[in-house]
Amino acid sequence: MVFECFQCGECCAHLGLVHSIEKEYGYYRYRIHNKYTNEDTLVTVDPDKHALFDDKTIFEKIPLACPFFRYQPGSDLAFCTVHHTRPEICRDYQCWRLLILNPRGRRVGKIPHIRSLVSDDPLLNRIWEDCVEHHNEPDDRRWEDAMITTLTRAGYTVRR
Ligand code: SF4
Ligand code: SF4
């Protein structure tokens, strides 16, 4: 299964609770400490993201964001400014197995690796309730196929 990140930023927006800057070495090099795993990682701000990293206004709106997380000014596109050297735990992270878009292409739901729906869309929630009853399929891949078929018929687009 290929995971594709859509840079919404939801995952990094609260990771200031987990990641802190332990040490600054200069030339955009830092040591990050992970409070939960106790791991340290040496990171370097990507050369093309210095200006983005230097802009700290994000913390006025999102005070709990990871210290290296930024939004591109004037857009909803999120960036990890240390993408090339980010901690392993960030590299391994995949937030969902199915991403659900409505007919206008707006992201309205996601299904993480456990079989649960994260969505505020009432129709999607109703369909989900029906699917849970009907798609009692033990094989994950076949279950995903069945979900995709049902949601596509209802007018949604599903990415995995
Ligand atoms: S990993 Fe998921 S939650 Fe994080 S930015 Fe990408 S799409 Fe958004
Ligand atoms: S280091 Fe990058 S990927 Fe990891 S939490 Fe911070 S902004 Fe997100």
Image: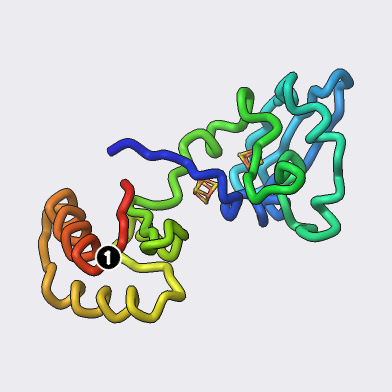
Please report the residue visible at 19 percent of the width from the left and 72 percent of the height from the top. 131
Please report the residue visible at 37 percent of the width from the left and 54 percent of the height from the top. 99
Location of ligand 2 given as a quarter of the image: top right
> For the residue marked with disc 1, what is the amino acid?
Gly
Q: Identify which residue, 35 or 100, lies in the foreground.
A: 100
Can you name the residue that lies furthest to the front here? 104
- What residue does disc 1 label? 155
Q: Quadrant of residue 103?
A: bottom left
Question: How many numbered tags mark residues here?
Answer: 1
Q: Position of residue 79 (x, y in %)?
A: 65, 39
Q: In the rendered view, tell whether residue 20 sits above or below residue 140.
A: above
Left/right of residue 70 with respect to residue 100 in the rendered view: right
At label 1, counting other C-alpha atoms closer than 10 Å, the crowd grade (few under 14, some 14-19, many 20 or more) is few
Please report the residue visible at 20 percent of the width from the left and 73 percent of the height from the top. 132
Q: Secondary structure at mark 1?
A: loop
Q: Position of residue 9 (x, y in %)?
A: 60, 50
Q: In the rendered view, tell whether residue 104 sits above or below residue 84.
A: below
Left/right of residue 138 with respect to residue 39 in the rendered view: left
Q: Quadrant of residue 34?
A: top right
Q: In the rendered view, tell whether residue 47 sits above or below residue 5.
A: above
Left/right of residue 121 with respect to residue 45 in the rendered view: left
Please report the residue visible at 65 percent of the width from the left and 51 percent of the height from the top. 76
